[in-house]
Amino acid sequence: MPDWAAIVIVILSVTAFAVAQGLTFPLISLVLEAKGVAGSLIGLNAAAYAAGAIVSVVTIDQLTARVRGNRLIVAALFGCSIGLAAFAMTDCLPIWFIARFAVGFCASLISILSGAWLNTATPDRIRGRISGFYGTGMCAGFAAGPLAIPLLGTTNGSAFALVSGYIASIGLACTVFNGGTRTVPERAPAGALLRFIGAAPILVLIELAFGFADIAAISGMAVYFVRVGHSEAFTAYAITVLSLPTAFAQPVVGWLLDKTSRAGVTISCGLLGAVAFLIIPFLQSEAAILIVFAAIGIATFALSTCALTILGERFDGGMLIAGTASFSLAYSIGSAMGSTGTGFLLDWISPSAVPTSVGLGLLAFTILVLFKRP
């Protein structure tokens, strides 16, 4: 039987994680820019978030050995809330660096633990569908976080305060639901991260491909649209179209994962994403571009849903946490490849090289998965 209380905690938690990440990246950059902070310091502040996330990955085995996973996820929620509250309460830049590190650390913990707990709490017959709703919560959070910026502005800290209060309320709700759970995320054994990467390199590659294509679509393609003559308003619509249909489509992807071949769904999503990227330079109609861009969002995010579902099918116990930790690391590496790679292509080759190169990269990934099934 599914552990529904645990599933509720997991989906609430990952939505809160996504709201925190979706808010902090654009809002902190905007606030620091308005204060006249140098671009290099803005970049370093963003790196503090990444550093916190990396520390959580490499210490997850020690943390889960000392604190039960269900309590750790609640503590991470309150940690995120406190970090966001610090942004609202002070303008001191050193404190913002500490708070950014703390939010990155806690948000990454939420992501790692929630993915592992989801698979512990869910029987295999419905694993794909539950993973799909998990993906929906994450997509909705990423879309909702930035909405606080136009609604509340960037000058008085109210956006930080509102999201801090929201995440604290999720922490309280999860504390209540914790009393009714029948499962907990199991501790990760020492050295499990490297053992998992050796045991399931294709699953790690799937998450890396997702990070690569996701960030390439969000950042590189936004610049591509402007440079080939589209308006900034069209670019904003394109990013919205990338996110919203993806949230609604993930339960359908999950249903397919439960009812058909999971490897087949993974290969199909990789191929769809590759073809969609490759045909964009040949499209003239803005409506057609938006439709294809929506397909990119659905297909690339579905790769993460596939990886999470197959993880739960193949592994159990502490290896689930090792798996989700390796996914977090792979996404970070893939996103760095996507952002730096597309920037190089834009500056040194041509705008059209961005969708073409990302499409070819996804095609190569799909061919590899075809011959090395996950």
Image (cartoon, helix red, strand yellow):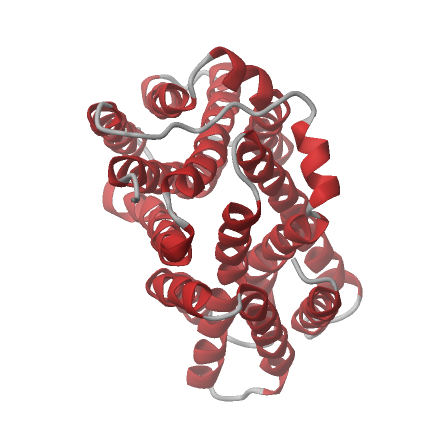
Question: Residue 80, image x and y in percent?
Answer: 38, 25
Question: Residue 171, image x and y in percent?
Answer: 27, 26
Q: Is residue 77 above or below residue 145?
A: above
Task: Name the residue at the top extreme.
Answer: 66
Residue in the foreground of this view, choosing between 75 and 351? 75
Q: Is residue 273 above or below residue 178?
A: below
Residue drawn at 19 percent across, 24 percent down: 176
Residue drawn at 33 percent across, 52 percent down: 140
Question: Residue 112, image x and y in percent?
Answer: 50, 34
Q: Is residue 12 above or below residue 294?
A: above
Residue in the foreground of this view, choosing between 170 and 318? 318
The answer to whether residue 351 is seen in the rendering is yes
Where on the picture, by quarter, is residue 223?
A: bottom right
Task: Name the residue at the front extreme.
Answer: 1
Q: Is residue 31 above or below residue 242?
A: above
Task: Name the residue at the right extreme.
Answer: 348
Question: Residue 326, image x and y in percent?
Answer: 63, 38
Where on the picture, by quarter, is residue 24?
A: top left
Where on the picture, by quarter, is residue 374?
A: bottom right
What is the quadrant of the N terminus in the image? top left
